[in-house]
Amino acid sequence: MNNILFLTSLNLLMTIIVILLLLNMNKRNEIDSFSSYYNSDGAFAGFIQKKNNLFRACEFSTNGSILSCSKWFDDDLLQQGQNQGLDQKNI
């Protein structure tokens, strides 16, 4: 009887640990981030910003000022060649 109780408790504990790990992995994917990219000469050219499952790209001019930024795109709704961005006021 003690052996069955021990195995049941161990199984319950392992299930809880797996659920917590899966929930934690989902949260990590939602972290806001910046990723830089460089031009062919190796100079910093811009960044990709991800925020609340939306992202946009910004490019810099040669003197370092922001040249342009794309609209915000929903990462889950992207289809190659058929995307329309969101205005910042709609975020």
Image (cartoon, grey):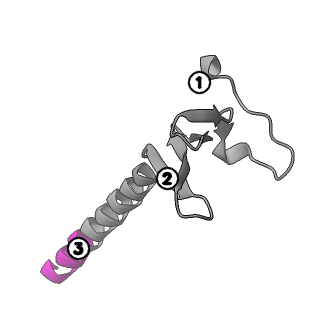
* Segment colored magenta: 1-10
Query: Farthest residue toward the right?
Result: 82
Mark 2 vs mark 3, foreground winner is: 2
Mark 1 vs mark 2, foreground winner is: 2
Find residue 91 and name its label.
Answer: 1
Q: Position of residue 3 (x, y in %)?
A: 17, 83
Query: Magenta stretch containing residue 2, yes or no?
Result: yes
Q: Is residue 30 left or right of residue 68?
A: left
- Residues 14 and 69: in front is 69
Which residue is tagged 3?
10
Give the residue type at disc 3.
Answer: Leu
In what quadrant of the picture does the N terminus appear?
bottom left
Residue in view at x 21 percent, y 69 percent:
9
Q: Earlier in the sequence, mark 1 or mark 3?
A: 3
How crowded is the residue under tag 1: few (<14 C-alpha within 10 Å), some, or many (20+)? few
Question: In the picture shown, does residue 14 fall above or below 83?
Answer: below
Question: In the picture shown, does residue 69 fall above or below 19?
Answer: above
Circle 1/circle 3 CB separation < 8 Å: no
Q: At numbered mark 1, what does the secondary structure look like: helix, strand or loop? A: loop
Q: Is residue 11 left or right of residue 25?
A: left
Circle 2/circle 3 CB separation < 8 Å: no
| Label 2 – label 3 distance at C-alpha | 42 Å
Query: Magenta stretch containing residue 75, yes or no?
Result: no
Q: At numbered mark 2, what does the secondary structure look like: helix, strand or loop? A: strand
Residue in view at x 62 percent, y 34 percent:
67
The answer to which image quadrant residue 24 occupies is bottom left
Give the residue type at disc 1.
Answer: Ile
Q: Is residue 22 left or right of residue 90?
A: left
Q: At numbered mark 3, what does the secondary structure look like: helix, strand or loop? A: helix
Q: Is residue 16 left or right of residue 33?
A: left
Find residue 35 and name its label.
Answer: 2
| Label 1 – label 3 distance at C-alpha | 45 Å
